[in-house]
């Protein structure tokens, strides 16, 4: 049970509670880059719960570190280098950072699906009893009771830095199981941009900001490149919090809502699936790009030839 479910709230009331300003809001702190603290005005109450539940507040906001900023700089520099080094290459590993439209669309879907699997697992109470997962699980589950304090109260930069460990796992797995070529680097960086940076940014702005949202965020939300408040708050933040687990853009939720909810599959299944994806997804995807593109090319040629033969006849 969480925000929107204290008195049997529905999607409309949940969205309204999340977006409106709360009475009695006070000034608070949020984190800036490299550990700096910025004073911001809060437009949400210190206690957002409809009724007392399991948590007395959101997880504490830890200071950011210099290595977080260095990591982010290296990731974005790598994306730029890859793009400009390969954009004029017509070969199978060329095409700039995005390479092709099908690969880009797939990574936008898959990156959202990856966050959904992890989110669904960490929303389960069983994870609170696993020491290695306890902190992350508390953060996800307390978020249901303190949705604004745990997002806008933390700041988007702090939320991005929270993804640092998973980014390191992704990079290490790509180095171990990938083929160490340009496509390995491209798929790995795409996953980081979508799942980590896109997930943190999409989730942050799905919890409001209203007119203060940057214009690019509003455009991205209208075009469904970023998660919308209606989809997330009006869907996932309605008890029992059993749908719409993807937090990047929501693209995968239409499919995964059939399989993921607040009870099934089991936590063990979810964690095994997340572990498998974390270790092998980059290696598997980069191995599938060339064969998939060859198949699509052959099918396109066959369709073109069939169309020409039909109109000639």
Image: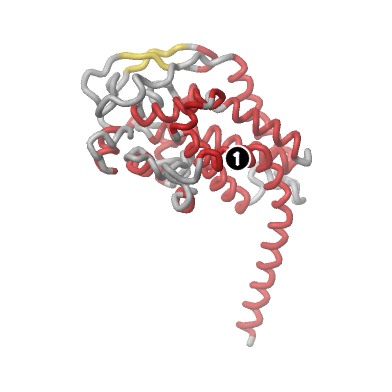
Residue position marked by numbered label 1 in the rendering: 272
Q: How many marks?
A: 1
Relative to the observer, which residue lies in front, 7 or 27?
Answer: 7
Residue displayed at 24% across by 40% down: 8
Percent x, y of residue 55: 36, 22
> How would you rate the neighbour count of disc 1 (Cα within 10 Å): few for under 14, some for 14-19, many for 20 or more?
few
Residue 203: quadrant of the picture: top left
Q: How is the image coloured?
A: secondary structure
Relative to the observer, which residue lies in front, 118 or 191?
Answer: 118
Residue displayed at 60% across by 30% down: 166
The C terminus, quarter of image: bottom right
Percent x, y of residue 112: 52, 43
The N terminus, quarter of image: top left
Note whether 143 is above or below 222 in the view shown.
Answer: above
Percent x, y of residue 114: 55, 41
Asked if one can make out residue 310 in the rendered structure from this viewpoint, the answer is: yes
Asked if one can make out residue 220 in the rendered structure from this viewpoint, the answer is: no
Percent x, y of residue 42: 31, 20
Residue displayed at 48% across by 50% down: 259
In terms of secondary structure, where does tag 1 sit? helix
Q: Is 258 situated left or right of 146 in this image? A: right
Relative to the observer, which residue lies in front, 84 or 37?
Answer: 37
Relative to the observer, which residue lies in front, 50 or 196?
Answer: 50
Note whether 95 is above or below 214 in the view shown.
Answer: below
Q: Is 187 situated left or right of 5 in this image? A: right
């Amino acid at each position: 049970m969480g925000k929107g479910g204290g008195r049997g709230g529905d999607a409309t009331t949940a969205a309204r509670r999340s977006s409106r300003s709360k009475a009695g809001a006070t000034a608070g702190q949020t984190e800036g880059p490299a550990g700096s603290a910025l004073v911001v005005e809060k437009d949400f109450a210190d206690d957002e719960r409809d009724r007392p539940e399991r948590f007395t507040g959101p997880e504490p906001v830890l200071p950011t570190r210099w290595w977080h900023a260095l990591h982010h700089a290296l990731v974005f520099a790598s994306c730029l280098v890859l793009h400009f080094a390969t954009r004029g290459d017509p070969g199978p590993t060329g095409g700039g950072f995005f390479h092709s439209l099908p690969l880009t669309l797939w990574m936008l879907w898959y990156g959202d699906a990856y966050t959904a699997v992890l989110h669904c697992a960490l929303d389960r109470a069983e994870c609170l009893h696993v020491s290695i997962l306890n902190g992350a699980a508390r953060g996800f589950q307390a978020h249901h009771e303190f949705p604004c304090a745990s997002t806008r109260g933390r700041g988007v930069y702090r939320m991005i830095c929270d993804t640092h460990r998973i980014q390191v796992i992704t990079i290490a797995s790509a180095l171990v199981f990938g083929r160490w070529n340009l496509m390995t680097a491209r798929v790995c960086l795409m996953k980081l941009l979508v799942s980590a940076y896109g997930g943190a940014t999409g989730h942050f702005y799905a919890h409001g900001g209203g007119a203060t949202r940057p214009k690019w965020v509003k455009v991205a939300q209208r075009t469904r490149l970023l998660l919308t408040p209606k989809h997330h708050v009006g869907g996932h933040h309605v008890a029992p919090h059993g749908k719409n687990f993807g937090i990047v853009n929501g693209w995968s939720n239409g499919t995964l809502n059939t399989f993921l909810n607040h009870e099934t599959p089991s936590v063990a299944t979810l964690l095994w699936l997340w572990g498998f994806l974390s270790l092998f997804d980059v290696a598997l995807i980069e191995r599938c790009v060339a064969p998939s593109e060859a198949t699509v090319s052959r099918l396109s040629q066959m369709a073109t030839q069939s169309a020409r033969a039909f109109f000639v006849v």
